[in-house]
């Protein structure tokens, strides 16, 4: 009897476990079916996202054209002879005889400095010289009449000549206290005034009276040392003169080969023929042509994208964007020369390229 009861209980337990497993399997199948539906929904959404909308772009068809690269620099018109007149000795300015715009001749006195001490010495020497001359003239007449000794006459002559040399020396010193025009020309600037202390060579402040010759003019500019070797005498130049609303085509007449230690620049010049419209210190823009290519492929520099592999642009090909690596040349005025990577007839994407990647569909506007 006990065995029958034990078997019955065991059978009940096995039946209960079987029912529980069947219920758990059904639950799992239901959960899997729900997950499958969720996966299908997500995959459908992802698939719809992969159907990309074409990007509107603008293109420019590349063709060979002339490309010119210039160096633009601010310049100034000056005189071929442009001299700062200053005294040979330091002194206080007492009088100024000229003003800007006045024509002066070489050697003309422009200003005087205080030389009162020298003037007093000259007055004293003149009295001595007058006495010595009178004595010499008198003894010379007496000696001609065989009166007096030759030695006395020679002594008087020596005194007279000594006084003359002394006066000439003082007069030469007095001239050092005068500012004279070193050339014939026009007074361009007066940077001293009465009461100032004028210095030889203009002093550290470079003050004095500037005289400029209008017979020959030149245009000067300073270029950064990075342009050294990129410009040379004979390069074409366009001078843009905003003050007279005009421009002049010419060539470089001088290129310095030495770089200034302080400014790290070198000097260039253009010699100019006489022109009544040009004036010293007139400003202008100098455009130096340092590169020409009569048949270049040129694109806007703004469409070039920098990448780790180099410079990249996009071209339109079969309604798709194609990434192209390019090698660039000279750059000027927002345009850059393409040396490698493009050919004539390519359709370069110039608008809408920022949102593209290689192979993206595009629509030309």
Image (spheres, rainbow, N blue to C red):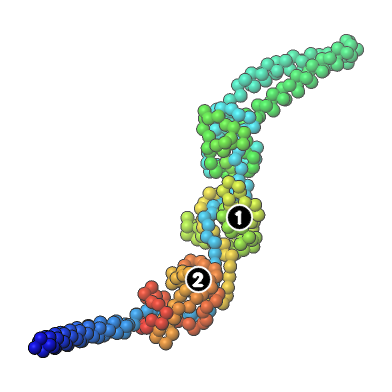
The quadrant of the image that shows the C terminus is bottom left
Q: Mark 1 points at which residue?
A: 268
Q: Residue 354 carries which label?
A: none
Helix, strand or loop status at disc 2: strand
Q: How many labels does the image show?
A: 2
Residue sitting at 37 percent across and 83 percent down? 361
Q: Name the residue under label 2.
A: 310
Q: Where is residue 305 in the image (x, y as percent from the top left)?
A: 45, 70
Viewer-side residue, 14 vs 344: 14
Q: Is residue 141 above or below residue 245?
A: above
Residue sitting at 62 percent across and 36 percent down? 201
Give the quadrant of residue 23: bottom left
The quadrant of the image that shows the N terminus is bottom left
Viewer-side residue, 185 vs 319: 319
Which of the two labelled residues, at mark 2 and mark 1, occupies the earlier sequence position?
A: 1
> Looking at the image, can residue 69 be seen?
yes
Q: Position of residue 122 (x, y in %)?
A: 67, 20
User: Image check: 154 left or right of 16?
Assistant: right
Q: In this view, does 345 lie above or below 331?
A: below
């Amino acid at each position: 009897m006990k065995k029958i009861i034990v078997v019955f209980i065991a059978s009940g337990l096995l039946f209960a476990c079987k029912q529980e497993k069947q219920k758990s399997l059904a639950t799992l199948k239901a959960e899997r079916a729900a997950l499958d539906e969720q996966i299908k929904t997500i995959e459908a959404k992802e698939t719809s996202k992969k159907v990309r909308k074409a990007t509107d772009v603008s293109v420019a068809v590349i063709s060979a054209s002339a490309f010119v690269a210039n160096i633009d620099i601010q310049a100034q018109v000056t005189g071929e002879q442009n001299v700062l007149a200053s005294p040979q000795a330091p002194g206080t300015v007492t009088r100024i005889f000229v003003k800007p715009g006045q024509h002066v001749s070489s050697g003309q006195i422009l200003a005087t400095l205080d030389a009162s001490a020298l003037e007093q010495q000259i007055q004293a020497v003149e009295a001595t010289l007058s006495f010595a001359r009178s004595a010499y003239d008198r003894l010379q007449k007496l000696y001609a009449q065989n009166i007096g000794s030759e030695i006395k006459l020679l002594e008087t002559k020596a005194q007279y000549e000594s006084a003359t040399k002394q006066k000439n020396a003082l007069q030469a010193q007095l001239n050092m206290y005068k500012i004279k025009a070193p050339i014939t020309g026009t007074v361009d600037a007066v940077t001293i005034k009465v009461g100032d202390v004028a210095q030889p060579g203009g002093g550290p402040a470079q003050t004095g009276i500037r005289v400029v010759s209008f017979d020959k003019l030149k245009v000067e500019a300073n270029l950064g040392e990075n342009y050294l070797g990129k410009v040379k005498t004979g390069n074409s130049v366009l001078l843009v003169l905003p003050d007279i609303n005009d421009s002049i085509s010419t060539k470089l007449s001088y290129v310095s080969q030495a770089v200034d230690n302080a400014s790290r620049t070198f000097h260039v010049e253009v010699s100019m023929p006489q022109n009544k419209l040009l004036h010293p210190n007139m400003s202008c823009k100098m455009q130096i042509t340092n590169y020409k290519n009569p048949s270049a492929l040129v694109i806007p520099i703004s469409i070039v994208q920098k990448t780790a592999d180099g410079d990249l642009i996009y071209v339109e090909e079969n309604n798709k964007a194609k990434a192209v690596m390019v090698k660039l040349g000279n750059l000027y005025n927002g345009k850059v020369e393409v040396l490698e990577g493009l050919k004539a007839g390519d359709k370069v994407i110039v608008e809408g390229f920022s949102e593209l990647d290689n192979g993206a569909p595009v629509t030309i506007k």
